[in-house]
């Protein structure tokens, strides 16, 4: 690592001496959270079954538009 010889702080000087080292103590293992199983909701078995078909139709439409653009 190249250092300038006229730097009075030396080679171990921080990049920004105005910044102070600070340790964040707002997160850690000593905090207790809520149980995630208390907020779980049961989904209807038929809910969301149509999405694969919707995406298949959208994909086919996009494919048809791409073929049209490329060929015509």
Image (cartoon, helix red, strand yellow):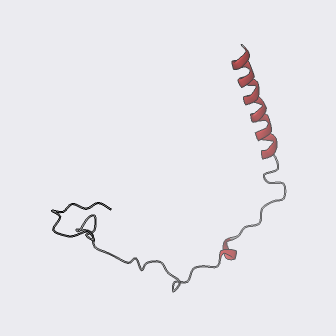
Tell me residue 41's x, y (percent). 72, 67
| Residue at image location 33% in from the left, 62% down from the top | 1
In the image, 28: left or right of 46? left
Tell me residue 46's x, y (percent). 84, 54
Q: Quadrant of residue 16?
A: bottom left
Q: Quadrant of residue 57?
A: top right
The image shows a total of numbered marks equal to 0
| Residue at image location 70% in from the left, 75% down from the top | 37
Looking at this rendering, what residue extends furthest in the right direction? 45
In the figure, 8 relative to 31: above or below? above
In the figure, 17 relative to 28: above or below? above
Q: Nearer the viewer, residue 16 or 35?
A: 16
In the figure, 52 relative to 10: above or below? above
In the image, 44: left or right of 3? right
In the image, 58: left or right of 2? right
| Residue at image location 28% in from the left, 68% down from the top | 14
Tell me residue 7's x, y (percent). 17, 64
Q: Quadrant of residue 38?
A: bottom right
């Amino acid at each position: 690592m190249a250092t300038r010889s006229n730097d009075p702080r030396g080679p171990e000087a921080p990049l920004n001496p105005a910044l102070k080292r600070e340790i964040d103590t707002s997160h850690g293992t000593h905090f207790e959270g809520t149980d995630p199983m208390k907020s779980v909701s049961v989904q209807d078995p038929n809910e969301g079954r149509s999405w694969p078909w919707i995406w298949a139709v959208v994909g086919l439409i996009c494919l048809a538009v791409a073929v049209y653009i490329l060929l015509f």
